[in-house]
Amino acid sequence: MNAAKFLIIPLVLAVMVGACKEQRHSNSDYIDPDIGGVGHLLQPTRPTVHIPNQMVRMYPVRADYLDDQISWYPMSIISHRQGELFGIKPINGGASDDRWGYRLTYDHDLEVKRPWYYQAWLVDDEIQVEYAPTARAGIYRFVFPGDEFSLIFQSLQQGTFAVKDNKVIEGEEEFMGMKAFIYGEWNVAGEAGAETETVASPRRLEQKTGRAWISGKLPEQKVVKFKYGFSFISTEQARENLEKVIPGWSLKEIKEQGKKVWEQKMNQISVKGGTTAQKRTFYTALYRTYERMININEYGKYFSAYDHRVHESDKPFYVDDWVWDTYLAHHPLRMILDPEQEGDMLQSYVDMYKQSGWLPQFPLTWGDNPAMNGFHSSIVMLDAWRKGIRGFDIETAYEGMKKNATMATMLPWRNGPNCSLDSFYYEHGYYPALHPGEQETVPQVHPFERRQAVAVTLGGAYDSWAVAQMAGELGNKDDYDFFMKWAENYKNVYNPEKKLMWPRDAEGNWIDIDPKFDGGPGGRDYYDENNGYTYAWQVQHDIPGLIDLMGGRAEFEKNLDNLFREDLGRRKWQFWAKFPDATGLVGQFSMGNEPSFHIPYLYNFTSSPWKTQRRIRFLLDVWYKDNIFGIPGDEDGGGMTAFVVFSMMGFYPITPGIPWYTVGSPVFEEVTIDLSNGRQFKVIAKNASKVNKYIQKAEFNGKPMDIPWFSHEELVNGGVLKLVMGPKPNKALWKDADVGFLYEK
């Protein structure tokens, strides 16, 4: 053999090894923002491009993944699913009247969607679009096919634009009683202008629709760049936001900065084993959890819609949360991954209370949206406190918790002081329901959302438990005793004959209904978005008490089994015409809505914990595929996908407010969480696979586990949960486990 060949071979191998290192997967490579892009019945996910938990969020405005045309590219969104602000659109030719409604046709396969970067090819116009965000600013890059270009701008709410010196655009949009601002610049010369049209609007008698444009000759490279700052304070602040982070014109630089931030977030949890599809589902779910809440502090000051003032502060101010959805898994996940940030978010809740007089229910950008029912921020406050998070003013938080519990109306979708139905609840311990066809007599009741009498009673019991427990933490025995009595109000709507939570009228009589179907749209006369079979299990704060109501562990398990097997009693289209939120059906169980999340884990309270392992794996395998249908219901900005993150790792916070986790069935052979205190928590599931889903043996920190539970303290101290998995259940494992001590009063 020629000696030269011996020299070439090591060189080739070295190059190959180097290439492999360069191509090494980052966890962020598994993210696919198109997962869930077609909603089963209601909302799809959006391919949101943003920096984690920051105020500039962009996605192409279109119906869903099936829509092959884009209406606008926005500068940001208002709040999750609340609309967009300041649209921009590249077009060939001038800004003629017919171009404002023109939609941009794109090719799905030529669209690049990463959390930190977006690119599309507009096939009809032969224009390439690129975008990269920062926390408070963003930059677009457009490549045109000919010698001329145009960019057009339109207010997507109610707004105006002004163009200065043919090189700067300033915009202002009004929405829900507050304003947003942009300051933008482009990098090429051209003729620019702006106009405002007053038009009739379904929402307002008059609406100001702002339009602006720039047109001109293209430079040799045929590239036009547009960069902008975004603000909720002023145009001048938007300009400052831009100049601080995008002083130049390099989109690539902004893209790389964003990529590093996302890689850091995704690398906080590393996994081994599992399939590529499972990793795509897992890391996409993790990415979704960072869309909310968002920090709207702009370099030392922020505008609050809770008192309509600009505040000076060096602390973050977080908005955009739907706590009915997020208290279950989203907030608990953040308490593990970033407890300091969670403390800042809860302090933002406290600040909103000080500014407005109430702890908000859904603290959106524009103020509190009293959506759904319950004051579940109380549960989050308690959960955080018991997990050692001290970054918020607990005394003021408790003041707000108590005020909401005793002075705010419990009516769904209503803000303000209590009403006659609340007074009835305080005296009798349940919300009274109306009989089918009975006319509503209380004017404060929302005409569509109705009383939701059973759901309100159950949610109020859990909230009262949280207030009581926090009172206990603070040494307030009188409040503890008072609210613990209210925590048992769930018993007042349990019908022992039906073994379901059941509506009763003001005289205390059970109302004759079909719990599968009655109650109007979404069952809202009695329940909320789900029927009586789902609400049978809404007693997370006192599961042993619920077991006793149902007649003991055997009956409890039998009822659980029946939930997953009970038929709808009608065709699916008939059911969904009334319950469109109750998707992801398995029997009467609805995987597509948040109240169901804890239910599969309830088998860990029975003599058959192995059924939790079976159910969780089945639900993950069936409903959370890595494709456009891979979210079974409304994803709710991280509310649902946090459940996926927990469940795929192999544990779940079944009762927020009790700092313990119950064990499920890990998808991966190994999961490692890098904790903020410098330690690691590991879940090792030896032999885990699609078939090997059952736990044969379990240890925590080398010691056998006699219950399928471990504490938050054990997790953050750097624990190791070690499981041996197999294809058939170990029915003896944890068969007689008793975790009633966790729920002792």
Image (cartoon, rainbow, N blue to C red):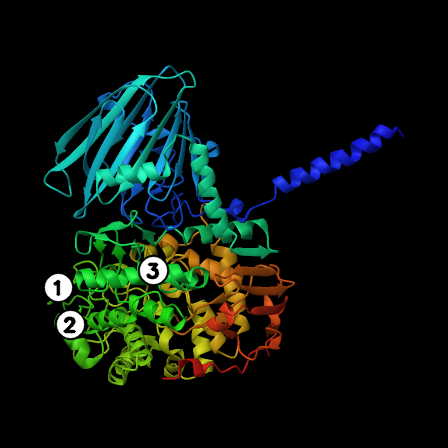
Q: Are marks 1 and 3 in contact (CB under 8 Å)?
A: no
Residue count near mark 2 (Cα–Cα under 10 Å), binned few <14, some 14–19, many ≥20 = many
Residue drawn at x 42%, y 31% is 250
Q: How much space separates mark 3 and mark 2, taking CA atoms?
A: 35 Å
Q: How much space separates mark 1 and mark 2, taking CA atoms?
A: 9 Å
**SS label for mark 1:** loop
Which residue position holds label 1?
444
Q: 233 or 570: nearer the eye?
A: 233
Q: Are marks 1 and 2 in contact (CB under 8 Å)?
A: yes
**Does residue 724 appear left or right of residue 184 in this picture?**
right
**Does residue 288 appear left or right of residue 1 in this picture?**
left
Residue type of the residue flagged with mark 2 = Leu
Front of the two marks 3 and 2 = 3
Which residue position holds label 3?
344
Which residue position holds label 2?
421
Residue count near mark 3 (Cα–Cα under 10 Å), binned few <14, some 14–19, many ≥20 = many
Q: Position of residue 124 (x, y in %)?
A: 39, 23
